[in-house]
Image (cartoon, helix red, strand yellow):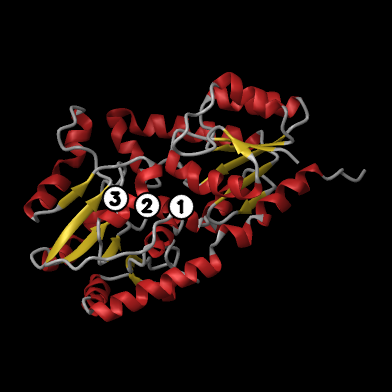
Amino acid sequence: MRVFFVGSKYDGCFYARCMVPMRENGWAGTRMSLRGLPLSAKDVARNAMVSDVVVFHRPDFDQRIELMKLLQENGKKVVFDNDDTYVPNSGVPMGKFFGAKEAELIETWNKKIYEAIGVSDLVTCSTETLAEEYRHLHPNVVVMPNLVDPDDWPEPEHKPSPKLRVGIVGSVASTGDWEVIKPFLDTIKDEVQLVVMGLPRRDHDHATLTEIFQPMFDYFDACGTEYRLPVPMADYPHELLDMNLDLCLIPRTDNYFNRCKSNIKFLEMSMLEIPVIASGFEDGRSPYQGKDEPYMRVCVTLDDWAKAYENLKDRRTREALGKAAREYVLGNYHIKDHAHLWRNEYLKLLEPKSS
């Protein structure tokens, strides 16, 4: 069975959703390594045409969808994979970048995603919440977990620092989640070194972005925050190690977009033995509530955040939780133990249909 993975414009997502299972199973894709150049459109089409199964990560524009249709017409099995929802009014943070056209553009974007789902033979996604959405659109939806390849991660290492180094997970789309814990941050900002990951440069010249991020930068500047700019996915594990974090905060606004998200940040932090404090939701649908919960501190109220932080101020408690989390992740999310899940699902697509 020949399988070919077609990536999206998001290297981090492509790595977690496609490259890890692709490499372990000996398959090919538009990118074979995160340091290599992506294939040209012509080479993508050529490789797809000689494959049995072609997997598309988040195909959300016409050229990708047309390729999906062409492949099906030529007898190929087509798989749609995604790890986020783009339902309008769900809290999709990227929409804030679109200004006055936000609602219109998000709706158009989501329609393209739904169109791609409609021409697929199999839909895979990262969480059961997202799967529930897609099952209204397609009869064959399977949850495929995010997994880790230890070979991509440096050995955990921590250097003593004058202040507790507290990371806050962010991205170019993190335009509100931090506010969930702002009252808690107010109580600790003077005794810790806050480290914010993934924000864009403050001096960007896009007017809408400046307006969106201004309150965030004003607040974190006043806290003496250390900023770490986004880096290519190939450099991310070593950049994360270099941050020398004592613990990591993962705040989430309770909305549908965040309920569809996965536990990927917990997996990443755990690979470096960085203990996690994460947002839980009243309905229990946070990506950090469930089987992973014993290996982090999950908080629903601000009081929960304060108690979790006070507990993890103790170095031995932090180290014990970080080591336990890493052992748990390696025991339950190692790609070598689960690579067969992808192979099994793709083989099912190639089985002869009974008449």
Whether 220 is drawn above or below 107: the answer is below
Q: Earlier in the sequence, mark 3 or mark 1?
A: 1
Residue 313 falls left or right of residue 75 = left
Whether 10 is drawn above or below 227: the answer is above
The structure residue drawn at horizontal position 24% and vertical position 77%, both measured from the top left corner, is: 315
Q: Quadrant of residue 47?
A: top right
Q: Quadrant of residue 331?
A: bottom right
Q: Quadrant of residue 66?
A: top right
Q: Which mark is residue 237?
A: 2
Q: Which mark is residue 152?
A: 1
Nearer to the camera, 131 or 205: 205
* Residue bearing mark 3: 170
Nearer to the camera, 23 or 165: 23
Q: Nearer the viewer, mark 3 or mark 1?
A: 1
The structure residue drawn at horizontal position 15% and vertical position 33%, both measured from the top left corner, is: 203
Q: Quadrant of the N terminus?
A: top right
Q: Amino acid at mark 1?
A: Asp
Residue projecting furthest to the right: 355
